[in-house]
Image (tube, rainbow, N blue to C red):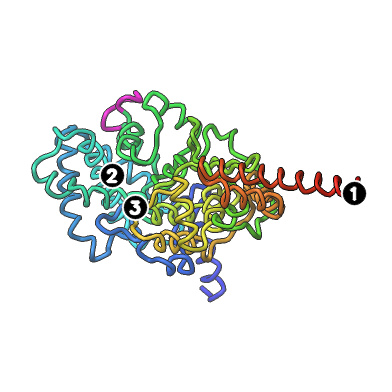
Amino acid sequence: MTIRDVVIDMVEKVQPPVHDGCCIYRVPSIIRKVNEDAYTPKLVSIGPFHHNLPCLQNMQRHKLSYCKAFLQRTKANSDQLIQYIEDLEPHFRGYYSHTLQFSWEELVKIIFVDSCFIFELFWKDESDDRKSPEDKAFIFNNMVRETIALDLLLLENQLPFFVLEHLYDMCFHTTSMDSSFVKLTFCYFSYYHEVPLDKIRDFVSENKISHFTDLLRTFYLPNPSKERPSRDRDYVNHLPSATELLEGGVEFKVTTEENKCLLNLKFSRGVFEMPQLLVEDGTELVFRNIMALEQFHYSEESYITDYVIVMDLLINTSKDVDTLIRKRILVNCLGDSDSVANLFNGLCKNILQANFNSHYFELCKNLNDFHRNPCNKLKSTLRRDYCKGPWQTAASIAAIILLILSVIQTICSILQVIQQ
């Protein structure tokens, strides 16, 4: 066989590294290097990307213990589950953006153990009665429980949702929403959404879920999808900061309507309405992983990235953060305002946009126009300097009346002199 034949044979045997279902991505180094910790699990690895990280090996025995407990509790047919995973394995690799350096047997074991661990973890989380003293001391210790939940939301730390859902259904032989893996998942991540349990079926039918990071993104989007704004190629180049807008006459107001979707920003007649955002330890991690997902999977629908861009424009310094805190737009759980300013100023670094939310573009245009109008700034100055409270307002009005009367008296005196 000639070298030419060898090369042609090698090329023909190559399988596509990914397929249309690819949804789990390695975050590129240009984005990852800005904050490595935001993309790396702290306690538990799920799926193949971080499986061999030395710092996560201590959790492997807990995963195996939970896997065993799940099989014993449900009396699930492990042979049947493994057979499904074996049949899926050749196709499974295509759901990941990078080549998986695991053998067939290793990958099957990873999927099986991680899936059963998640099932048992979610089931125990529903009720304290299901937790042993050992569970409460470690896995469901408040700090550990929160860390694991955040690990499960990392883009690189995922299994395809349909795999988890199908394996779970095989164990319980049911399609009822009341006992489904979807409901179990929504209960576990209840902190991040307000979807009523009786609306879960509608929510899922409206939104195709690829994995937990994708589900988290969907929680933040307007639902149903027809309410999501159109997108165009126009971009926002400038927006005054929150402090500048306030000084220019813009009134900030927390959204009070029932639809408190985080992305629901409105500006009308000088009033900028924004939903309240709680900024805490996990906020940066959540935004960074959703934005990384949008870079690859939703480059034409990057609604969360649009929101972060607007927040980045509004917040330049700690003074802007303080302005938004006073207006109850932000609730700061990080401590100092500089930390919040640095968080938003760093989120968009090395992030690219294919298009932009048309509603946000129009909103920013209107804010810029309002801020440029000198009359609005003058009215704001008058309100700020002379109408801070009812007594100051009354005193200002009285002074204006006295001034007008003095002018009238002066005019009358001049007219009287002229007539003489």
User: Quick one: label 1, few (<14), some, or many (20+) residues within 10 Å?
Assistant: few
User: How many numbered marks, from 0 up?
Assistant: 3
Residue 381 at what x, y percent from top left?
A: 61, 52
- From the image, tell me which residue sits under label 3: 333
| Residue 180 sits above or below residue 338 on the image | above
Q: Name the secondary structure under disc 2.
A: helix
Which residue lies at the image location 71% right of the left edge and 54% below the top edge?
374
Report whether 339 appears left or right of 1: left
| Residue 66, image quadrant | top left
| Residue 28 sits above or below residue 128 on the image | below
* Span shown in magenta: 170-179
| Residue 354, image quadrant | bottom right
Report whether 409 appears left or right of 189: right
- From the image, tell me which residue sits under label 1: 418
- Determine if residue 296 is in view: no
Which residue lies at the image location 36% right of the left edge and 44% below the top edge?
87
